[in-house]
Image (cartoon, helix red, strand yellow):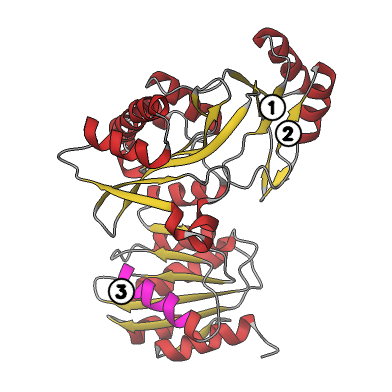
Amino acid sequence: MKIHEYQGKDLFSKYGIPTVKGSVCRSKEEALLAYDKLGLSKAVVKAQVLTGGRGKAGGVKLADNRDELGRVAESILGMDIKGYIVDRVLVAEAVDIADEYYLSFVIDRNVKSVEMILSREGGVEIEDVAKTSPEKIHKIPIFPFVGVPDFLARKAASLLFDDFGLIVQGKEMIKRLYKLMIETDASLVEINPLVVCKNGDLIALDAKINFDDNSLYRQPEIEALFEPTKEEQKELFAKSKGFSFVQLKGEIGCMVNGAGLAMATMDMIKLYGGNPANFLDIGGSSNPNKVVEAMKILMSDSDVKAVLINIFGGITRCDDVARGLLEAFKQIKTEIPIVIRLAGTNEKEGRAILADTHFYSAETMGEAIRKVVELTNPKN
């Protein structure tokens, strides 16, 4: 789960992490009112969308006076940034920046712990720094039963700063940022840029926080901030119906029973030159209603050019899946081709039910995947 920058800054303030004063606004009039109320002279207007690259897209702009702020806010509101329409902006105090740095904590499953990441190259995407200058990035694994004691925070701050005063400020910010991460069940807390102002203050100029979805049940205040995207709404709907769904970027819709078979199916689709549009595991149930709901989700993706249904019947009975498919297509009208592979429990009965229908049938996984890739790339 992601939250907006302004929501992240509210959490920063709660944990004593210095940031800039600002106000979220949904119109030009609200932006002008915030400018007056905050007593600003020079201000920054930042698009609030749940994606990165706002600055490159023109979603972050400075305003030297009130009139310019109104024009800037109006130009940003309604922008399309990577498919997200800007419906609110953050009007905040502009600061005199002396230097920019990078600081984050992230769950690193490779080291099986939280990892602190620091760099003196702030204000740019950390992925770019990792590619071009990996030696400028410092990574410190955090032992979970120890956390970030004073000596470790001081050591980390000294990797960023040479000035003793900044090391002292940085040490406290690092400890508070880690505390925020642990207490809110965050999977990522990032400050980029972490800035040193010309007056010597250390400030979190941006705030990016992601949370572990599985922990939201014990974080009601965090869960209340959740604004699911269309893809996330699909995933939540799928979860409520008892199956696992993850939206991807391809053109082949997949419905499979079993996570292992689903992963193998997606791998083979890539092997044969196709791109899966989703991960969809209907699980071990043979309930036809699940198939109906699964097909509704697959058909709702406008990028899907063909659907592959790959069922290995163990607990799941192939004849129940076949009946579910027929029921689904009484409710859903589509011209999208459907390729079905049924194998295992009651596979003959399942194939008999689907005989003389418009579905493409295959007995082997390889045959089914070759066919669905061919249907999505007819010229090949």
- 330 lies left or right of 62: left
* Mark nearer the N terminus (3 vs 1): 1
The picture places residue 337, in percent across and down from the top left corner, at 60, 78
What kind of residue is marked 1? Val
Residue displayed at 38% across by 58% down: 244
The front one of 90 and 201 is 201
- Residue 112 located within the stretch drawn in magenta: no
Where residue 317 is drawn, which disc sits there?
A: 3
Local secondary structure at mark 3: loop
Local secondary structure at mark 1: strand
Quadrant of the image containing the C terminus: bottom right
Residue displayed at 29% across by 77% down: 313
In the rendered image, the residue lying farthest to the left is 145
The residue labelled by disc 1 is: 44
What kind of residue is marked 3? Arg
Residue displayed at 37% across by 63% down: 282
Q: What range is drawn magenta here?
A: 258-269
Visible in this render: residue 276? yes
In the rendered image, the residue lying farthest to the front is 163
The picture places residue 30, in percent across and down from the top left corner, at 72, 17
Visible in this render: residue 210? no
Q: Are marks 2 and 1 in contact (CB under 8 Å)?
A: yes
Q: Name the main secondary structure of what is drawn in magenta.
A: helix
Where residue 61 is drawn, which disc sits there?
A: 2
Residue displayed at 29% across by 71% down: 316
- Residue 265 located within the stretch drawn in magenta: yes
